[in-house]
Structure formats: structure tokens, C-alpha cells
Amino acid sequence: MQNADFPATTRARAITREDVWQAADALLLAGQRPTIERIRLHLGRGSPNTVSPHLDAWFAGLGARLQDPQAFAAPASLPDPVSQAARYLWEAAQAEARAAAAAGFAGREAALEAARQALETEQGALAQERAVLEARLAAADGALAELARARDEAGERAARAEAQLLAQQADNDTLRAQLEQARQEKDTLLAEAASQRAAWDKERETMAGRASANERRMALELDAARVAAKDGQRLLEGERRAAQQKLAEAAEAAARQAGEATRLGKAMAVLEERLRQQEAMLAEYRRMRESRGGAEPEMQRAGRPGMARSRQLRAARAPRVKV
């Protein structure tokens, strides 16, 4: 090829527009389609980035040059065979250029048709996607409406719950007030029970003291009766009857006190179980008094007859049993 005969200085020179155009004209006259690689091989140098713009400019001016018959004409001084060969090459180049142009037009039309079909396909896909998006948008609007309705319902439920909570708080305050009142009443009842229990304990101590004093007096009277029993049995019988009457009176008084104690015990039973034990103590005390009342005649009968005279003298001033 021609690039093998070029000197080193020519290969080293930068490629110009004229170099690319001359190489393209030579390739076209040789019946070849000018391309970047063919021009680089024809020139023996040049990068694609350098050759490409010059080749595009050559193709852009090719139509105008084809309209000029002298653009590729051989010099007039050439022999007739050379002129005929050049004319032949020119006509061949024009035919190839027309074929290339037609092929380019056909390729462009095919590309445009493919682009049109791709555009229609893309438009159909876009229409489908638009329909899907519109359906999604409608679903989203429905979901938003549902969310708004759910929000309104939740607000109403929250308002009802708040009202119920306020009512429950009011009820709780009322219950707390009632509980506090019940607690105060309980404390009052406990205080009253404590006061009644203290009074009962005091009364029980008083009754126990009186019972002890009566026992001591009865013991003294029994001793005196033993001394006075020597002087007469009849006086002893009278004293016995008097003593029985006194004991009956004491028992009756004790019964009245027991009834009062029972009434107090019933009032205190609702507050404290321990009061029942005190009622049992009172009953035990009453049984003890009754048992002591039954033992006194035996003790009086055990007195000596020699004490009758002394008993007769003291009968008029015998002490009464105080309860």
C-alpha cells in the first residue's frame, strides 16, 4: 500500500483537513467507502479523534462536490485512456455515493421506523403505567379517606374515653370521701368503744372492790355469828333470813348491773370481741356470789350455841350489805 512508501518526516507531521480529504477522494476513486480506519491505513498515521471530524466534513461537502463535474475531473493534459479511466472512476464513485446515500437514507428510515415503533411501545407502556398510577392514586385517595374516617372515629373514641375517665375520677373522689368518712366514723366508734371499755373496767373494779368489802363484812359477821350462836338458834335463824334477804338484794342489784353490763356488751360487741370475755367474767362472778350465798347457812349452823346471846345483842345493829 502507499503508506509504506511515506518518509518518516511525513508520518511525523500532523494530519490536516486536506490530508483526510485527499485520502477520502483516493479511496472513493479506488471504489472503496471512506472510513476512519481506511483513511488511517491510507495515511499511515492519525488517531480516530483527529480523522473523524475531517471525515464528517468531507461527507458533508460530498453532495455539493458531486454536483460539480470538475470536482473530481482529471487534468486536461492527461491522455485520453487516463481521462476515460478517470471518468469511469468518477461515475463509479457517483454510483457508489448514490448507493451509500440511499443505504444511509434507508438505514435512517429503518432507524426512524424502529424509533417510532419503540416510541409507540414506550407510549403504550407509559399509558399502562399511567393507568396503574391513576389506579394507585385512586386507591391512595380511598386509603386517605379511610384514614381520615378512622382518625375521626379515634378522636370520638378518645373524647368518650376522656369523658368516662373524668366521670370515673369523680366517682373515685366520691368513694375516697366516703371512705374517709367511714374511716372517721370507725375511729369515732373505736374511741367510744375504748371509752366504754374503760368505764366498764372501772365499774368492774368497783364491783370487785364492793364484792371484796362484802366478803370481808360477811366474814366478820360470820365470825360474830359464831360467837353469838351460843345464845340462841332462833336468833341465828333470824340472822340467816336477814342475811338471805340481804344476799337476795345484793343478787338483784348484781342482776341489774349484769343486765346493764349485758346491754353495754351488746353495744360493744360490733367493735371488739374481747368484751365478750368480760361478760363471761361477770357471769362467773355472779355464779360465785350465788355459790357463796348457798354456803352461808351451813357456816352459820356451824356456829356455837353460846354465841346466841352476843348475836341477839348485835342483831339490832347488824351492818347492811352494800352493793
Image: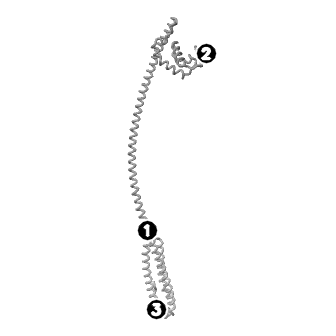
Q: Where is 262 relative to 60, above or below?
A: below
Where residue 5 sits in the image (x, y, percent)?
60, 14
Q: Residue at the spot x=42%, y=27% of the render?
A: 119
Q: Residues within 10 Å of mark 1 (few under 14, many from 20)?
A: few
> Foreground residue, 24 or 194?
24
Where residue 121 sits in the image (x, y, percent)?
42, 27
Q: Where is 227 relative to 126, above or below?
A: below
Q: Which residue in the structure is indicated by mark 3?
A: 317
Where residue 245 sits in the image (x, y, percent)?
43, 86
Where residue 130 sits in the image (x, y, percent)?
40, 33
Which scheme is used to colour this image of the protein?
A: one colour
Q: How many marks?
A: 3
| Residue type (three-letter) at the residue carrying disc 2 | Pro
Per the model, the C-alpha gap separating discs 3 and 2 is: 182 Å
Q: Where is 52 relative to 228, above or below?
A: above
> Foreground residue, 44 or 150?
44
Q: Which mark is residue 184?
A: 1
Q: Residues within 10 Å of mark 3 (few under 14, many from 20)?
A: few
Q: Residues within 10 Å of mark 2 (few under 14, many from 20)?
A: few
| Quadrant assignment, res 136 | top left
Q: Which mark is residue 7?
A: 2
Position of the C terminus by quadrant: bottom left
| Residue type (three-letter) at the residue carrying disc 3 | Arg
Say which of marks 3 and 2 sits in front: 2
| Residue type (three-letter) at the residue carrying disc 1 | Gln
Q: Which mark is residue 318?
A: none
Position of the N terminus by quadrant: top right
